[in-house]
Amino acid sequence: MKNILLFISVIISLSFLNAQKPMSPSFEDIISLHSVFNAVISPDGNNLVFESRTTDWKENRYDRELWLSKKGDKPIQLTNNLEASSTSPKWSPNGEWIAFLSKRGDKTQIHAIRFEGGEAFQVTHTKNNIQGFEWSPDGRKIAFLQSEDKTEEEKKRKEKFGGFKIEDVEYQLNQIWLANFNPSQLGNRLRPDQLKDTLYTKTLEAKIIMDSVSFSINVFKWSPDGKKIAFEHQPDPLINSFFKADISIYDMAAKTYKTLVNNASYDGLVDWSPEGDAILYQSNLNDSTSNYYLNRKLFRINTDGSQNKQLASDFDENIYGLKWTQNGIFGMAWQKTLRPVIRINPVNGKTKVLAINAKRIWNFSFSKDGKKIAYAASNDHDINEIYHGFYPIKDSKKITESTIQLNNWSVANSEVVSWKSKDGALIEGILHKPQNYDPAKKYPLLVIIHGGPTGISTPGPTPSYVYPMVQWLNKGALILRPNYRGSAGYGEDFRSLNVKNLGVGDAWDVLSGVAALEDKGIIDGKKVGAMGWSQGGYISAFLTTNSTKFKAISVGAGISNWMTYYVNTDIHPFTRQYLKATPWSDKKIYEKTSPMTNINKAQTPTLIQHGEFDKRVPVANAYELFQGLQDKGVETELIIYKGFGHGINKPKERLAATWHNWKWFGKYIWDEEIEVPGE
């Protein structure tokens, strides 16, 4: 009910504003935008369910709930968990039920609700959180992933020895469990014929399959006939063990498994063939030294190990969200700032980019016969919407109206620009302009650098995170978001350009982009600021100590010293791959690419923002840069966001971080003294 009332309130408010002058939205307005994603079509293709995210300021969280559209009609809310989200919807094979994950107690469990509506029922009652699940093809069972239970062992040890943990040794393996789906035990809101059907009369407690194995399972897929389960597994659940992932097949009747794919590096399960005689998988083959930035290769292999054949070798980008249907293999891939659907011919392996009425597809789902499709997508001037249509994709119907939230807002106008970097590399970026842009005027410029490095910036009306971009545009600034070397969408050669050149080449790309805009006469070169998070924070830190071009910089969760980062991060292979060394084998490359190396040259006022419990970029990086800047007398401020890891994922702290950036750049770009409300 809360989300329905909120949605109605938004619509009424927006209707009233239709006749009003466009306004600059507040920080809270941007953070409160509700978004839709993860469209999942029913087996018959007539209906679809999707997730909608709203902002709960009182509870300081983002709430995700399920919405349903029947036969293309206006969507209605399906779930409403007052304490936690409802996510990951999956239709039962007969299309009568929608199962989903939700925490309605101590643990995240599988729940189910009838397509026709009514109460949601809890299907599983296990000791640990459930991470993912799949219906069996006949709808009688649900298989799910759950970590092994070591509660009693840990409790006994703590009582005797207190608390400690042995790094990289102690963990809980992820295992496949199996539960019967028995609607007769979920309540009395069933049809009489279901209650009498012997299919639903037997019950079985959830049980583990493949007990006592020495590996951890990442993902799994039922075979089309339900007789087998293909699964991807690695020696343990530690983040860096994905390099050793292999693929095996479990026989339900024989209760045995056999390894099918075991290359030296990563092998990732994708899907079964529609006939059930082959597996689709991605692999790094033997490459464990460059797979952070080179393309993964795609293969199909018969379940007996024969006809192992590479597909999509003609396509120079990673392909995501792959699905094997009767009409071919489909996925999504970045093509510069576009994200189209790619079709792969399973016979000859050739790829084709499909024409769709949207520039960026975020997910898609096919009906069982492959004739209908649902997808979530966006364009340059709208936010995510849900679509429902036919394959081949044409005349799709837009199911949602999320972009109506932007009515009478003054938002970003976006265009893709390009320039040549110092070494001649062609770089693209997104230039955001205010709606009242005057080409005769010179504007202050804010450069916002994405993370990754294999991330990407794209056009859009309301770019944000912890940066008040829309408000800066409306204040009278331009925003440049460069897709520096290493970004996704431009092929693996481009993604390799910052290998052994991190920071250095990235800085070339940022500075040359600023210079290109200055040469056009559209920016005030004396009023330029830069900022970014994660890898974008690292590049910002590098600019702080290696450039005097910027009036102010904000470093969000950025690396300051690759040497100390290497021994603290949870992804040590990242540094080894991009720098091609450890600190002990090539100290010079670590010095060349570390912001702290040139701390003595730093002059730019620098705000540092970091999560207290960040494992990806440990908070020591923030303290090191902060102390170095203080020692050199550079104006700096360090803000630690309590309880957060690598990202700021709660609305109140996101609001605080936005205000902190607004205040910092207001002072140094606009010469304003801004007070943060409540501080």
Image: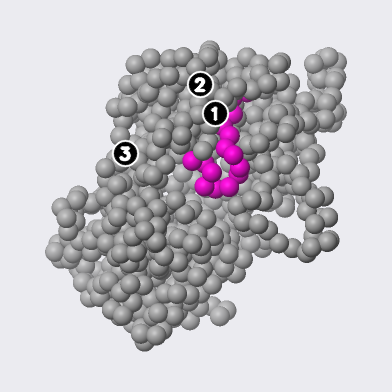
Picture quarter containing residue 88? top right
Discs 1, 2 touching: Cβ within 8 Å: yes
Where does the image place residue 70, in percent across and percent down from the top left? Answer: 60, 28
Residue 544: give its label: none
Identify which residue is drawn at 45% across, 63% down. 565
Nearer-the-camera pick, 99 or 241: 241
Compared to residue 540, the image places residue 193 above or below, namely above
Q: Secondary structure at mark 3?
A: loop
Which tag, 1 or 2, sits closer to the chain's start?
1
The residue identified by callout 1 is 247
Picture quarter containing residue 550? bottom left
* Whether residue 411 is visible: no
- The three-letter amino acid code for the residue at tag 1 is Ile
Q: Secondary structure at mark 1?
A: strand
Identify which residue is drawn at 36% across, 87% down. 633
Which tag, 2 or 3, sits closer to the chain's start?
2
- The three-letter amino acid code for the residue at tag 2 is Ile
**CA distance for labels 1 and 2:** 10 Å
Let me know if residue 236 is in the magenta part.
yes
Select label 1 or label 2 by which is in front. Answer: 1
Select label 2 or label 3 by which is in front. Answer: 2
Identify which residue is drawn at 46% across, 44% down. 384
- The three-letter amino acid code for the residue at tag 3 is Gln
The residue identified by callout 2 is 279
Residue 335: give its label: 3
**On-image quarter of the C terminus:** bottom right
Q: Range of the magenta residues?
A: 229-243
Q: Secondary structure at mark 2?
A: strand
Q: Is residue 284 left or right of residue 255?
A: left
Discs 2, 3 touching: Cβ within 8 Å: no
